[in-house]
Image: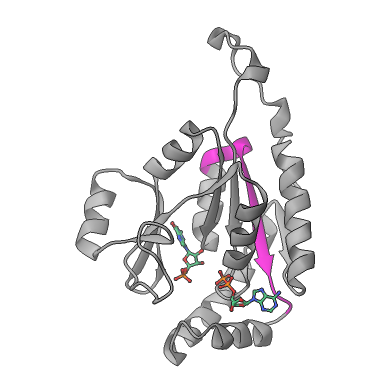
Amino acid sequence: MNKKPNPTNFALPKRYNIIEEQMKIGKAVIFSAPSGSGKSTIVKRLLTKRKDLEFSISATTRARRPNEVRGLDYYFLTKKDFFAKVDNGSFLEYEEVYPGTYYGTLKSELDRIWKAGNHVIFDLDVKGGLKLNEILTIRALAIYIKVENLFTLKNRLIARDTENQDQITLRLAKASEEAAFESKFDVSIVNHDLDEALQHAEEVINRFLK
Ligand code: ADP
Ligand code: 5GP
């Protein structure tokens, strides 16, 4: 981990007059990776392991996949509705992740999860992940998930069978650009063996949330 003061040293200004140990300070764990690296798989497994982690449900203009549930995997919006939310300041960040397809983090998700006394877990593209890490400063930990090479990535996307050939080509082209940002993340984890990657992620998160 290469950054930031240890968040457990984070001190509230005295004027809050609150005994710090009684105060639950919500934190955020941000996962970013080129599409197909396995970050959703890792995030889903982590959510079953730590009950104090809650997933931030993003809004998107992309079509729902058959296995996805509205309001659970994403809030699926038309472009008109998405941009109405952009205009009224509902997003903490949003990106045109693929040409013509938008994804964004709603402020209401962060509020909902922190108010419930939980820590928030994000699954974001690389640019959005770094942006949010900057906004949330010491309350956030940004983790980059990677695979050893593009060949593996391509095979995983093909095996997942959720995108057509053109979309896979687009995602692979973007993966090369995204890899250039790896060093800006707090932690990098290779997802070769899923169990090892999961264990690594758990260790890092347990330390951060301690
Ligand atoms: P992302 O969320 O990064 O786009 P996914 O979690 O959807 O990626 O994973 C892409 C595909 O690769 C899925 O079919 C998933 O089951 C598979 N996968 C994830 N991790 C591994 C791994 N370590 N080894 C082999 N296949 C994996
Ligand atoms: P997918 O279409 O495979 O679900 O997601 C495509 C990409 O969009 C992934 O890299 C995912 O992490 C990213 N993404 C999902 N939600 C958000 C979001 O709210 N903001 C940003 N910037 N990226 C997101």
| Spot occupied by residue 133 in the image (x, y as percentages of width and height) | 57, 46
Viewer-proximal residue among 188 and 77: 77
Image point (42%, 69%), residue name: 68
Viewer-proximal residue among 7 and 156: 156
Image point (55%, 88%), residue name: 158
Q: Is residue 89 above or below residue 177?
A: above
| Spot occupied by residue 116 in the image (x, y as percentages of width and height) | 49, 34
Residue 136 is covered by the magenta coloring? yes
| Spot occupied by residue 168 in the image (x, y as percentages of width and height) | 49, 85
Q: Quadrant of residue 185?
A: bottom right
Q: Is residue 77 above or below residue 110?
A: below
Describe residue 111's horizontal placement relative to residue 62 as left or right. right
As drawn, which residue projects farthest toward the bottom?
Answer: 165
Image point (63%, 18%), residue name: 22
Is residue 1 something that shows in the picture? no
Viewer-proximal residue among 37 and 113: 113
Image point (43%, 36%), residue name: 111
| Spot occupied by residue 199 in the image (x, y as percentages of width and height) | 78, 59
Query: Quarter holding the C terminus?
Result: top right
> Magenta part of the protein: which range?
135-148
